[in-house]
Image (tube, rainbow, N blue to C red):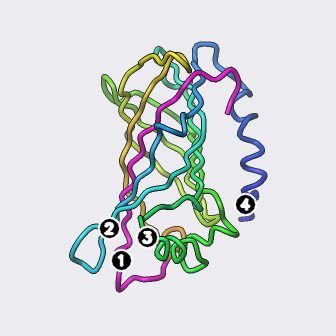
Amino acid sequence: MRRPSMRVLLFCLPFFFTAGFAGGADPYKLDPVHSTVGFSIKCLGAFRFKGHFNELTGTILFDEKAPQNSRVALVVNADSIDTASDTLDAHLKSKTYFNTKIYPNIVFISDSVRQAGNDTYEVAGRLTLLSVTKPLTVSARFKGRGNDSEVGGLMGFTTSFIINRRDFGMTAGRLIVGDDVTMTISAVGGPASDAP
């Protein structure tokens, strides 16, 4: 099946949020300074290798009273991968792994949100990596609201989930690193007049 290009997908994100906007949903634009994306993967069968991405953007529409009206769109800049090694970063950005010159973004867009507990939400959506889109359901924990003197009201969510890199066509290095990648996201949002 032919999929829309990533450029088309990113262009459509604002319309995704404005179409059918629910009046009770508060729009939050992710704070790139305080929002983080980390990952870990088993290496050489002996330890877990950790790294992170430095650039995460996106928008969360959060309706606490009617969670089904909530929406999420996250964009990770794959070229911002950071392992504390310039040599390894360059290798991971190459066509062997993330191929960031061709596929610069990793995108998650929600299809549905439902409350699963007092402060937990089940978010089902689609994750696109290396132009391959797969369904993904994660459990997100609401960390609460706060206030910043410069940006105003803040809210935070955290989630951790596992993806299989082979599902997205990333098959290199199987003798060195495992297939399952644990992703950990801490999303901090500030008020947004429009989205994303």
Q: Is residue 4 left or right of residue 50?
A: right
Q: Are marks 2 and 3 in contact (CB under 8 Å)?
A: no
Circle on res. 100: none
Secondary structure at badge 2 equals strand
Q: CA distance from mark 1 to mark 4?
A: 29 Å
For marks 3 and 1 on the same chain, the one whose residue lies earlier in the sequence: 3
Pair 3/4: label in front: 3
Q: CA distance from mark 2 to mark 4?
A: 32 Å
Residue highlighted by disc 2:
49
Residue highlighted by disc 1:
177
Residue highlighted by disc 4:
3
Q: CA distance from mark 3 to mark 4?
A: 34 Å
Q: CA distance from mark 3 to mark 1?
A: 17 Å
For marks 1 and 4 on the same chain, the one whose residue lies earlier in the sequence: 4
For marks 2 and 4 on the same chain, the one whose residue lies earlier in the sequence: 4
**Residue at screen point 61% across, 64% down:** 132
Pair 2/4: label in front: 2
Instruction: Please provide the residue range marked out in magenta.
Output: 171-196
Residue highlighted by disc 3:
85
- Mark 1 packing: few (<14 Cα in 10 Å), some, or many (20+)? some
Q: CA distance from mark 1 to mark 2?
A: 9 Å
